[in-house]
Image (spheres, helix red, strand yellow):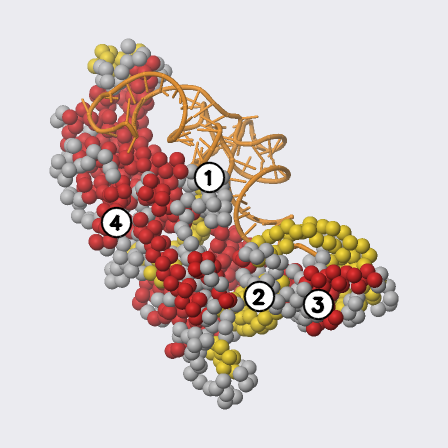
Amino acid sequence: MEFPKRPNFKELEERINDLWAREKIYKFQPNSKKPVYSIDTPPPTISGKLHIGHAFSYSQAEFIARYKRMRGYNVFYPFGYDNNGLPTERLTEEMHNVKAKDMPRSEFVKLCLETSRKVEQEYERVFKRMGVSCDWSEVYRTIEPRVQRISQASFLKLYKKGRVYRKLAPTIWCPKCETAIAQVELKDKELKSTFNYILFELEDGNKIEIATTRPELLASCCAIFVHPEDKRYKHLVGKKAKVPLFDFYVPIIADRRADPNKGTGIVMFCTFGDLTDVDWFYAYNFEPKISIARDGTMNELAGKYKGLSVKEAREAIINDLKERGLLVKQVPIKHTVNVHERCDTEIEFLLTKQWFIKYLDLKKEFIKAGRKIKWWPEHMRVRYENWVNGLQWDWCISRQRYFGVPFPVWYCKKCGKEILADYEQLPVDPLRDKPNKKCECGSTEFEPEKDVMDTWATSALTPLINAGWDKGIKHKRFKMLYPMSLRPNAHDIITFWDFNTIVMGLFHTGKPPFKNIMISGHGLDRHGRKMSKSRGNVVLPLDMMEKYSADALRWWAASVKLGEDLNFREEDLQAGIRHATKLWNTARFASMHIKEKPKKPRKLNIVDKWLLAELSQVIEKCTQAFEHYEYSKAKMYAEQFFWNVFCDYYLEMIKYRLYSSKEKDSALWTLYTALLTQLKLFAPFIPFVTEELYQLLFRKYEKDKSIHISAWPKAEKSWQDEKALKLGRIAMECIAALRKWKKLKNISLAEEVERVTLLHPSPKSVEGIKNEIEKTMRVKQLIVEKGSEVVAK
RNA sequence: GGGCCUGUAGUCUAGUGGUUAGGACACCUCGCUCACAUCGAGGAGGUCGGCGGUUCGAUUCCGCCCAGGCCCACCA
């Protein structure tokens, strides 16, 4: 086959991608006898465009997949899309300029599905272009019927185990948009506000001073807190105080969450002013008093202030307090509040019924499960444990949204009882479907549950989804794939995705859902900031691959240690191009000499022995690195060997043998073997160019139809040769010294010199390799003597 | 405020209780030598964040501090 002088990366990457698809190189083999390596691919959120950060972390997991495949594993590497939930809703609203609450729900859901199908196709194009070696016939979507069935079945099972319950809980609510919102939709905003110092009367007539920014919530006051060690107020604990204007009594309680240094050190607890109030509500089981309605106006509980907006009520109440002499002072402050990121409205908390998964009693089990899993890098497990130890609430899994997995639940209109769907009915949409049976009370009238499940309640099931949990945990496929060998994801979702998945895995199988967790960092912009649309710093992987190549992008992604963030600078992509080009030229050089498969010679030249000894060390180091998910080290070892040993020295040293016939066989065989080995070491990182070179140069002599299913190199015992290693390294030193000397004397490297004396620490050992040094450096006679590094003519 | 991580030439980074701290980009000089000018050869550039401690010896181990990142908490 003709060997092109220059690579056309774009053309060859397209062609190689076709080859892989045609030959189904990455297809999982359910009937193979090879050991299985299963990967629980993170399903990217359908929220817009993929940026460099995605390319970065998906590449890193992908290196491992390719390595394991070459190690002889039957790699199960599915792909998924997380298109359930809020991000997809928002994208849909943006793209179609609609608002979910202004249109029929079914129509909105249809639009979301359409949107996500389109975006999925774009995503797939990008990942395929990157050479992500997933089995594209194993694709799931978190909104698809099969996954909905699994997610709902998970809910039913947990319900039957008593792990799921429903109770009143505060919900984040935007009074302007009149909708429940999720925590991710919040942003911080610094606002000016006023601390109002208000007098509360004790039963004995004494008065205490309380500072609050939200006097309009007086009607919602449930209790008053002081810090247990606050000497000023210890005597108050257990007493009662009268709420001004509304004249009802609330208890005074000691609690550590009351900060003695804030305001007066006495705080009123209302349902709900902020998140601390929510905390207290859970901790003390108070009867809530809600005085703000869904539209952000005051309700009946607020008495004469009913109908006023929160702001109007605040003013009115302050005025009334002033009139009665109950307002001591007002102090302006700046504080940060949570606002809805879309409309900048300060959020409120409403009390609604929510579904929870009960798991606080299992913290110890979660820690234990986390320790059964190998974390790479190891220290990432600490973050997991911190999270588990700090858990305070059960997991609220209901969301007042539209696009997501519905709860398989109805409520009896007559007696209010919860009716659950049968397994056979799943997936079910209670808004559309009816229960299979009557209520126990005989009624056939049902109210559907309108909420959808938290997206994490579904994505936490990906190992089960991938392993085919719906077919049963005794099924062959499930046993083959579960627990997953690897869960790869970035460090920001350890506490969400990894934690929740471990929870679900334990609930449903009693086992941790994976054996290894590989935590990658973030690909950031030049200045170390996350890429986002609003910042306008998004770099698209497709653009970069068009301009450079997929291999170049991957090479960049491999350049940082596992778990570390990496700033993206476009000029760094040159390194990948450079490396691929060098590899190309090396292969082209080899192709000029290799005309048939070289036979292993009976006796190897000392230089070839040295090269193989170096090579076997590199193989050993790369393999070790990969076994510890340290792809960046593997890349570095292979790269440094290739560039600084193989190209800079070895190739130069064997040239004269290749162009003559003296010991040519030994050089040819070593060249062939070393080059093929190095292509394999690089294959996980730059799969396209290594495949192209394999096809061009080696395919006709090797059995495997793709380098990516060929065997990972083995560090041959017979190659290890301490003596040759030492000799070769001295030779490198000698050559470097000669190069320096020629440069110093202004002699061209190509020019032959008569006689050089090289003073070297161990001249004897050089004898065996002298010939190579002479030819490489074009020296007629090389004399090596004991001494320092000086070179003379 | 808590936890974890990071801090090495202008930039990105490797690495180690012990000679001159390794590589890449950028920079300077020379060179189209038969794989490669998308290259090669050579060169300049570092108080290994700061301060203490352990040690014969610390960039490496320990403590404190400073700076940056991430997650969590706080934001009455």
Quadrant for the C terminus of chain A in the image: top left
The secondary element bearing badge 3 is classed as helix
For the point 57% across and 72% down, which residue is it?
A353
Q: Earlier in the sequence, mark 2 or mark 1?
A: 2
> Residue flagged by tag 3: what amino acid is it?
Ser
Chain that bears disc 1: A
**Above or below A470: residue A731:** above
> Residue flagged by tag 4: what amino acid is it?
Asn
For the point 54% across and 73% down, which residue is it?
A165
- Marking on residue A178: 2
Residue A563's x, y, as percent? 45, 46
- Marking on residue A17: 4
> Residue flagged by tag 2: what amino acid is it?
Glu
A623 relative position to A332: left or right: left
Q: Residues within 10 Å of mark 2 (few under 14, many from 20)?
A: few
Residue that mark 3 sits on: A220
Q: Are marks 3 and 2 on the same chain?
A: yes
Q: Earlier in the sequence, mark 4 or mark 3?
A: 4
